[in-house]
Image (cartoon, grey):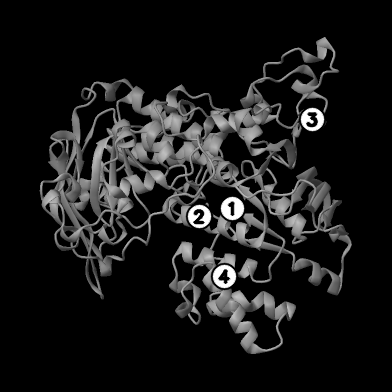
């Protein structure tokens, strides 16, 4: 895995998403699925993307991979710069050389994303052969076996010659990780990688992803709804709501000083292991439908602090108290709040 | 937390066992069995929340199903209000089933898509024929819909029109419409978003206070269990590992498996995942469970005796029951010799 460590220093910007807008063109009209999304991902660091279902987390990941369902979805604006190249402008052919090679993805359901009639070893080798034209089949098989060992599977030879149905959920997810990391990608996107797994297996898989990140200096995007996982894995956190970014900061800061009322609500609604009893805080209402977005700040109908200004105008994404590393889209942190 | 009477036991489960035969060959003769549930005993008090936790395949859902007799237990007894539930037949069974209800994990597949909300909720009362007139029945449906926070205008809508949280409310309404004594909640919130989850948990607690329900709360999420439960039973591979009040269990887990489970729960705090001690290996197959203590293949404190002898339930502290040789004071010194177990190798055995 030495080659990827040479690619760049930790903390260097790898991916810059700039003002990304994705729209769904449906019979019901144009639905803004992602609006003005901007963030950066750095080498060797983990960015967690959190939010309720339907907030555009998976759409963000699929946009980077250029895997959004077209039609109805279309990137209508903005840029996704990966090592300086704008992925949005690439042709399908050019994009294919990035996908699975420089950028890899791990999906939520390991059973549905593996080929059920192909040996696990072969599936890993397949990706290698596609992206390395000069590699022989034998070399690819050897590399596949090396990867299976690398992700900590006992009896790697046996697993390489097994079909996915013969393996447990945790093992399958390890095969997915081995496959994703086989071409030593610079960036790994994990879309709810452990939701279908048990707690101990979840911890094993997450620890593995984190170890890989450290050893190969990969940038990891972790899509999750588990705040505990965010706290243990992430360096940076992006909170999304109804297709917009509402908060972006370093992970410890998010849990110490969550700025946006939505983030506060998310954190408060988790039953804590430290304290127990009493009523849980629940954010009132539901995530709005894309076809029926409220005016002004999208969160205002559910926000306990909403004032007149929130219903009229959408807040800009600005630093909290001048801290460039902590940005939030909320009127509470602007001068307009005191006047309102 | 709702208080409950220690003496008022609604459900007494003793030695509940379930083996599923594995059918092989042309004639479907069964050669071996899957040990889904082995000799599980517990009591549920009136108004109490009794949680069953463990990884998938540990038998927690089987336990719930066997109590309800949705699958017939192989052996063991379930005493419901002093009546032997496992022996009931016909009308007596239908009558007794009014006291036991179930809430399912998946709010999408557990509601009939062709029935309106009102009909779904009313189905148990229609079957039990509780109300003579249609007006009474409809009044009861309205009452329950209000109790679970469903708008009355939803009466004639269909399940697909609702979100996950709303559907779970319909499921809860259906479970409580007959005023049962015990509701078995099989992972009721694990398919929901955190904010919706919080609402459903609050609703369950509120209904418990109001109606004096007892819950058997089956879950793999320890933080939810810690929030809602009074007593907790930890299961592994069909066996009871540890059983105690919530405070005892979370403050001082005794069984190495419980400790490992508590260690891996993702927590908000300064800890990073790299520094965690994580239980290695996978859960062994219940068709071929390990000999001796079923946890010995993954146990960090495995001893010689664990390989051969199954641990008995011991009361390590008052009210704190654990099935582990570490707390057996009668063991000889040579039996206590630690054994290093390679979990990977053991899983292959």
Q: Where on the picture, by quarter, is residue B80?
A: bottom right
Q: What kind of element bears circle 2?
A: loop
- The first of marks 3 and 1 along the sequence is 1
Give the foreground label among 3 and 4.
Answer: 3
Mark 4 highlights which residue? B111
Q: Do marks 3 and 2 share a chain?
A: yes
**Which of the numbered marks, if any, corresponds to residue B315?**
3
- The first of marks 3 and 2 along the sequence is 2
Label 4: chain? B
Q: Are marks 1 and 2 in contact (CB under 8 Å)?
A: yes
Question: What is the CA distance from the residue labelled 4 to the residue labelled 2?
Answer: 15 Å
State left or right for residue A180 relative to residue A145: left
Q: Nearer the viewer, residue A111 or B90?
A: B90
Question: What is the CA distance from the residue labelled 3 to the residue labelled 4?
Answer: 42 Å
Q: Does A239 sit above or below residue B315?
A: below
Question: What is the CA distance from the residue labelled 3 to the residue labelled 2?
Answer: 35 Å
Q: Does A14 sit above or below residue B178?
A: above
Label 1: chain? B
For the residue carrying disc 2, how many other residues have a C-alpha within 10 Å: few (<14), some (14-19), or many (20+)? some
Q: Position of residue B342 (x, y in %)?
A: 64, 21
Q: Which residue sits at x=42%, y=34%? A: B268
Question: What is the CA distance from the residue labelled 3 to the residue labelled 1?
Answer: 28 Å
């Amino acid at each position: 895995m030495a080659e990827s460590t040479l690619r760049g220093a930790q903390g260097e910007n790898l991916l810059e998403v700039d003002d990304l807008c994705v729209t769904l063109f449906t019979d019901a009209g144009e639905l803004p699925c992602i609006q003005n999304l901007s963030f950066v991902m750095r080498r060797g660091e983990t960015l967690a993307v959190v939010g309720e279902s339907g907030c555009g987390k998976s759409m963000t990941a699929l946009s980077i991979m250029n895997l959004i369902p077209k039609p109805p979805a279309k990137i209508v604006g903005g840029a996704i710069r990966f090592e300086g190249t704008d992925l949005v402008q690439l042709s399908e052919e050019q994009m294919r050389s990035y996908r699975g090679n420089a950028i890899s993805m791990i999906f939520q359901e390991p059973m549905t994303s593996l080929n059920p009639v192909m040996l696990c070893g072969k599936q890993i080798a397949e990706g290698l052969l596609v992206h390395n034209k000069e590699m022989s089949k034998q070399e690819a098989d050897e590399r596949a076996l090396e990867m299976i060992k690398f992700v900590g599977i006992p009896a790697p030879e046996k697993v390489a010659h097994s079909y996915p149905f013969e393996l447990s959920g945790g093992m399958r997810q390890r095969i997915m990780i081995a496959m994703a990391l086989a071409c030593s990608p610079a960036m790994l996107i994990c879309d709810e990688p452990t939701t279908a797994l048990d707690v101990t297996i979840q911890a094993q898989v997450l620890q593995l992803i984190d170890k890989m990140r450290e050893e190969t200096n990969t940038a990891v995007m972790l899509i999750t709804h588990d705040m505990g996982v965010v706290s243990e894995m992430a360096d940076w956190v992006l909170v999304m709501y109804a297709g917009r970014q509402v908060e972006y900061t370093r992970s410890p800061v998010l849990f110490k000083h969550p700025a946006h009322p939505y983030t506060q609500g998310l954190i408060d609604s988790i039953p804590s292991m430290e304290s127990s009893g009493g009523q849980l805080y629940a954010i009132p209402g539901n995530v709005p439908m894309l076809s029926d977005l409220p005016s002004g700040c999208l969160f205002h109908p559910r926000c306990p602090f909403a004032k007149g200004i929130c219903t009229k105008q959408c807040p800009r994404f600005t630093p909290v108290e001048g801290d460039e590393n902590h940005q939030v889209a909320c009127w509470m942190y602007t001068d307009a709040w005191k006047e309102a | 937390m709702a208080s409950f009477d220690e003496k008022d036991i609604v459900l007494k489960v003793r030695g509940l066992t379930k083996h599923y035969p594995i059918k092989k060959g042309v004639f479907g003769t069964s050669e071996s069995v899957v040990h889904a549930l082995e000799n599980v005993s517990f009591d549920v008090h009136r108004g109490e929340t009794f949680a069953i936790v463990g990884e998938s395949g540990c038998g927690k859902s089987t336990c719930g199903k066997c109590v309800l007799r949705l699958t017939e237990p192989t052996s063991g007894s379930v005493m419901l209000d002093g009546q032997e539930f496992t022996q009931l037949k016909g009308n007596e069974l239908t009558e007794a089933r009014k006291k036991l209800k179930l809430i399912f994990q998946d709010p999408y597949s557990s509601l009939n898509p062709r029935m309106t909300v009102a009909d779904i909720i009313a189905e148990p009362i229609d079957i039990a024929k509780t109300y003579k007139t249609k007006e009474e029945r409809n009044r009861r449906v309205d009452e329950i819909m209000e109790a679970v926070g469903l708008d009355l205008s939803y009466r004639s809508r269909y399940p697909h029109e609702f979100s996950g949280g709303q559907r779970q409310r319909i499921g809860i309404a259906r479970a409580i419409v007959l005023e049962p004594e015990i509701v078995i909640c099989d992972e009721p919130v694990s398919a929901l978003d955190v904010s919706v989850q919080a609402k459903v948990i609050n609703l369950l607690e509120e209904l418990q206070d109001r109606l004096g329900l007892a819950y058997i709360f089956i879950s793999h999420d320890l933080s939810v269990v810690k929030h809602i439960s009074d007593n907790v039973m930890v299961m592994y591979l069909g066996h009871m590992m540890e059983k105690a009040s919530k405070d005892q269990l979370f403050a001082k887990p005794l069984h190495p498996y419980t400790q490992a489970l508590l260690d891996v729960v993702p927590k908000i705090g300064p800890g990073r995942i790299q520094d965690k001690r994580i239980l290695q290996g996978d859960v062994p197959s219940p068709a071929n469970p390990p000999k001796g203590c079923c946890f010995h293949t993954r146990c960090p404190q495995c001893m010689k005796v664990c390989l051969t002898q199954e641990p008995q339930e011991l009361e390590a502290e008052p009210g704190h029951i654990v099935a582990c040789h570490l707390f057996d004071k009668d063991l000889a010194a040579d039996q206590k010799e630690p054994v290093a177990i390679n979990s990977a190798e053991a899983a292959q055995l």
